[in-house]
């Protein structure tokens, strides 16, 4: 009797060992937050994993595939392209190449038997692009979202070891096409003579930089829109007290909203508020013209101008005054101009004041300042001031290519560009970076370590230039000419 039972048990064990689980179907589900793969078996199975950043290998001992299972099972997704199913000595091997190192979860279910793999659509991968110079590191970011893929580039700068400076585009010799256009537009040169536009790469090379990104907003003439201060010289005045990036003499960085209070007193104590800096003079205006504007003010004869050097009136003109290299010109129109001519003469002293007033920080001695906006991060938290700073919907609400600047807790500066979709639809693919909203950009800056951050000009302007080449994918397919850039160069 015992012998019969032993024989029966041996037969059962041999029958069970000979029976292999069959993989008869692979299914996929596509969700906003994940992709789910389900491998269906007709019986219980075992599996073993080999995992790396590039791929997942699943070993299925004693398993086989039905005739319906192809060697390559396509997903055609940017995260996972396909499953490769192969026979191996002890069963099946399934290889899953990963386009990006992404979070995933693998687990088995028994009723019915199946293996489930969930691939997260949301991920952030950060790799080093190398050290550019001492104190400057390039980082590459690839980010998955439920809306698509995002690529970003980062320059992480220690301002104590490398110099960070805003720089204006300089006048350049027109190319053949521009010369032809100017021939039929003789007024164009006069209109554009005060500010210019050039590619970020051109600005950087002229300044001896090793890297650069585009800076603040600008008009089509090249005039910066918002506060720009370079080497303590005020280039342009604020718009809506928008957020600015500040650098001091002692290499400290700040981000804050800025109010600039400009005015002067005549010898008899009359105060005049300066209404603008380096811009066209309208009616009832008081405009300050500095050497960065050009050799002359270019104004008409409907005002009065004070040529100032060493706080002394050197000349009083009707218009189009020469701007002294060591001074400035105050250009007045409206009733103030008439009153001034009756109460001021050459040789009088002018008591001028340009007060830069940050809202909440206290920089000691401001060397450079670049406005932009809106603010993205404040005290380590998301803080987007797009309505307070009166930004248009294309900046405030859209998904686009972006440029941003941030400051870490240990005073490192982050210059960041985010690639947007190419302007030409026929150049877009499922691999194209889709750009970011301001909210997404804010979260990216925090993930990079920023405790303060703000937005800069974006869209077609977004450019990162490193050591002679454009490091990002520009939205227009090539570098666009901009008014100004933030450059990085070695400290001398």
Image: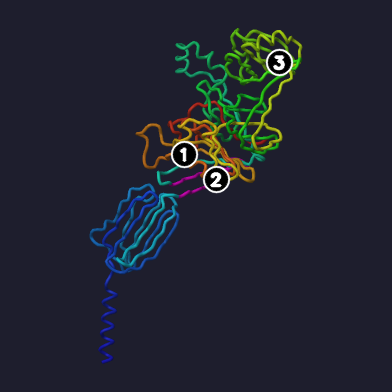
Whether residue 19 is visible, yes or no, is yes
Report the residue at 50% width, 14% height from top: 188
Work out whether 47 lies above or below 3. above
**Toward which corner of the image does residue 259 lie, by quadrant?**
top right
Q: Earlier in the sequence, mark 3 or mark 1?
A: 3
Q: Residues within 10 Å of mark 1 (few under 14, many from 20)?
A: some
Residue 328 horizontal/vertical position (percent): 68, 17
Q: Residues within 10 Å of mark 3 (few under 14, many from 20)?
A: many
Q: Which mark is residue 437?
A: 1
Q: Which residues are magenta?
A: 123-144
Q: Which residue is mark 3?
A: 308
Residue 466 horizontal/vertical position (percent): 54, 36
Q: What main secondary structure does the magenta stretch of the protein show?
A: strand
Whether residue 134 is visible, yes or no, is no
Report the residue at 34% width, 34% height from top: 426
Q: Which mark is residue 446?
A: 2
| Tag 3 secondary structure | strand
Report the residue at 31% width, 69% height from top: 44
**Is 213 in front, or is 265?**
265
């Amino acid at each position: 009797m015992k012998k019969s039972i032993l024989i029966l048990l041996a037969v059962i064990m041999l029958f069970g060992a000979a029976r292999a689980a069959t993989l008869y179907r692979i299914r996929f589900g596509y969700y906003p937050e994940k992709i789910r793969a389900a491998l269906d078996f007709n019986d219980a199975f075992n599996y073993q994993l080999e995992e790396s950043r590039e791929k997942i290998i699943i070993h299925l001992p004693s398993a086989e595939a039905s005739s319906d299972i192809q060697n390559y099972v396509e997903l055609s997704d940017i995260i996972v392209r396909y499953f490769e199913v192969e026979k191996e000595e002890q069963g099946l091997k399934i290889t899953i190449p990963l386009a990006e190192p992404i979070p995933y979860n693998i687990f088995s279910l028994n009723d019915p038997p199946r293996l489930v793999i969930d691939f997260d659509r949301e991920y952030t991968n950060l790799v080093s692009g190398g050290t550019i110079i001492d104190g400057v590191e390039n980082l590459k970011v690839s980010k998955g979202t439920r809306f698509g893929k995002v690529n970003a580039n980062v320059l992480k700068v220690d301002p104590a070891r490398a110099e960070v400076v805003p720089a204006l585009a300089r006048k350049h010799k027109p190319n053949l096409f521009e010369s032809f256009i100017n021939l039929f537009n003789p007024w164009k040169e006069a209109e554009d003579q005060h500010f210019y536009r050039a590619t970020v790469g051109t600005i950087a090379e002229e300044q001896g930089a090793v890297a650069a990104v585009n800076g603040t907003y600008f008009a089509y003439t090249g005039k910066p829109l918002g506060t720009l201060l370079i080497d303590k010289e005020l280039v342009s005045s604020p718009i809506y007290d928008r957020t600015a990036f500040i650098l001091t003499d002692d290499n400290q960085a700040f981000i804050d909203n800025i109010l600039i209070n400009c005015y002067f007193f005549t010898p008899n104590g009359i105060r005049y508020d300066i209404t603008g800096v380096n811009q066209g003079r309208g009616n009832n205006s008081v405009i300050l013209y500095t050497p960065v504007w050009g050799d002359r003010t270019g104004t008409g004869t409907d005002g009065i101008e004070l040529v100032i050097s060493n706080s002394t009136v050197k000349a009083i003109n009707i218009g189009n005054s020469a701007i002294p290299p060591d001074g400035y010109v105050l250009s007045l129109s409206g009733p103030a101009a008439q009153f001034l001519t009756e109460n001021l003469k050459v040789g009088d002293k002018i008591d001028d004041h340009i007060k830069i007033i940050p809202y909440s920080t206290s920089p000691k001695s401001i060397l450079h300042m670049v406005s932009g906006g809106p603010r993205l991060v404040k005290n380590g938290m998301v803080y987007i001031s797009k309505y307070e700073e009166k930004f248009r919907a294309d900046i405030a609400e859209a998904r686009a290519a972006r440029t941003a600047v941030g400051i870490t807790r240990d005073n490192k500066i982050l210059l960041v560009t985010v690639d947007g979709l190419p302007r030409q639809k026929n150049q877009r693919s499922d691999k194209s970076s889709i750009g970011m909203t301001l909210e997404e950009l804010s979260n990216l800056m925090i993930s990079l370590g920023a405790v303060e951050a703000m937005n800069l000009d974006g869209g077609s302007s977004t450019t990162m230039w490193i050591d002679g080449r454009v490091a990002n994918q520009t939205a227009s397919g090539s570098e666009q000419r901009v008014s100004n850039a933030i450059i990085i160069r070695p400290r001398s």
